[in-house]
Amino acid sequence: MLIKREHTIISREPRGCRNVNDLIARGIIERPRFLRRIMELYIMGLLKKHDGEIELTEADVLLLNAVEKVNIDRVPDLRIDSE
């Protein structure tokens, strides 16, 4: 699984434990895509989910520290054709 710009947008929101519905209400990313990205981050072990809240894992914090050194808005999303 690849990390896309949307993954980093979700992770860069205020750190710590956050309510999923509040983040969706901010309109950062449309709801279906937002929920999918949260599930992907969870599968990759980059966040924890519990009672409608998400929390970054240590791995995600390390990734964010690296991403902060790069202008992520200038990096295109990668597409891989597995066929």
Image (cartoon, helix red, strand yellow):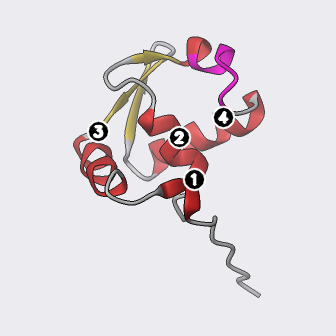
| Camera-side residue of 32 and 26 | 26
Res 57 label: 3
Which residue is denoted by mark 2 in the rendering? 9
Q: Looking at the image, do the residues carrying marks 3 and 4 touch, with CB atoms under 8 Å apart?
A: no
Residue 11 in the figure: left or right of residue 58: right
* Amino acid type of the residue tagged 1 in the rendering: Arg
Q: CA distance from mark 3 to mark 4?
A: 18 Å
Q: CA distance from mark 3 to mark 2?
A: 15 Å
Residue 69 in the figure: left or right of residue 19: left
Q: Is residue 74 positioned above or below 78 on the image?
A: above
Q: Residues within 10 Å of mark 4 (few under 14, many from 20)?
A: many
Question: What is the quadrant of residue 46 in the picture?
Answer: top left
List x then y, in percent, for residue 15: 34, 26
Whichever of labels 3 and 2 marks the residue nearer the N terminus, that label is: 2
Q: Residues within 10 Å of mark 1 (few under 14, many from 20)?
A: some
Q: CA distance from mark 1 to mark 3?
A: 18 Å
* Amino acid type of the residue tagged 4 in the rendering: Phe
List x then y, in percent, for residue 51: 46, 13
Magenta residues span: 23-28
Which residue is pictured at 37% across the width and 48% down the height? 45
Which residue is denoted by mark 1 in the rendering? 5
Q: Looking at the image, do the residues carrying marks 4 and 2 touch, with CB atoms under 8 Å apart?
A: no
Q: Nearer the viewer, mark 3 or mark 2?
A: 2
| Camera-side residue of 59 and 5 | 5
Q: Would residue 7 be visible to someone looking at this image?
A: yes
